[in-house]
Amino acid sequence: QVQLVESGGGLVQAGGSLRLSCAASGRIFGIDDMGWYRQAPGKQRELVTTITSGGSTNYADSVKGRFTISRDNAKNTVYLQMNSLKPEDTAVYYCNANLVGGSVLMWRDYWGQGTQVTVSS
């Protein structure tokens, strides 16, 4: 089985910082893009940022200049450094990875269980 396990969420004041981590584990043969999505109450899940296996990144306009995605391919782990947090960043953050592994030997998306980030004003 393949699992994505997130950590690092919590409660922070506006202007503060948090760092999220997401580690992929299990029978993994290769990982392509990894990324972070978020879902606020009453809203649809939205893209926050992605990173390719080669390190190319893409950010939502709302987080550009404040959030930084990175990854450690040797550890199958992706990180999200969030600075200058705003109350509107409050959401459940989900890790995503496009990988081949487990018993399904084809590329597919896997999701973490989500971690809550709450930014107080």
Image: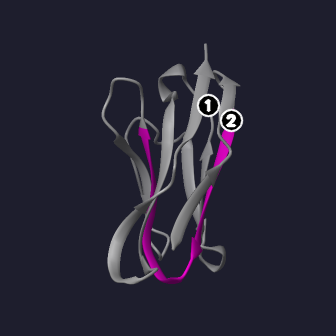
Judge whether 80 appears above or below 64 on screen: below
Residue denoted by label 1: 84
Left or right: where 7 falls relative to 28: right
Which residues lie in the magenta part?
17-38
**Between tags 1 and 2, which lies in front?**
2
Q: Amino acid at mark 2?
A: Ser
Q: Residue at x 67, y 39 (%)?
A: 18
Judge whether 84 appears above or below 73 on screen: above
Q: Residue at x 55, y 24 (%)?
A: 86
Nearer the observer, 62 or 80: 80
Nearer the observer, 30 or 83: 30
Q: In the displayed image of the protein, which residue is found farthest to the top?
A: 121
Residue 100: x and y, percent? 41, 80
Give the total of numbered labels: 2
Where is the C terminus found, in terms of image quarters? top right
Crowd around label 1: few <14 · some 14–19 · many ≥20 (10 Å):
some
Residue denoted by label 2: 17
Circles 1 and 2: CB atoms closer than 8 Å: yes
**In which quarter of the view is residue 61 placed?**
top left
The span from disc 1 to disc 2 (Cα, nearest Å) is 6 Å
Nearer the observer, 41 or 13: 41
Q: Main secondary structure of the magenta part?
A: strand
103 within the magenta span: no
Left or right: where 16 falls relative to 104: right
Residue 99: x and y, percent? 42, 75
Q: Secondary structure at mark 1?
A: loop
Whichever of callouts 1 and 2 sits on the residue coming sooner in the sequence is: 2
32 within the magenta span: yes
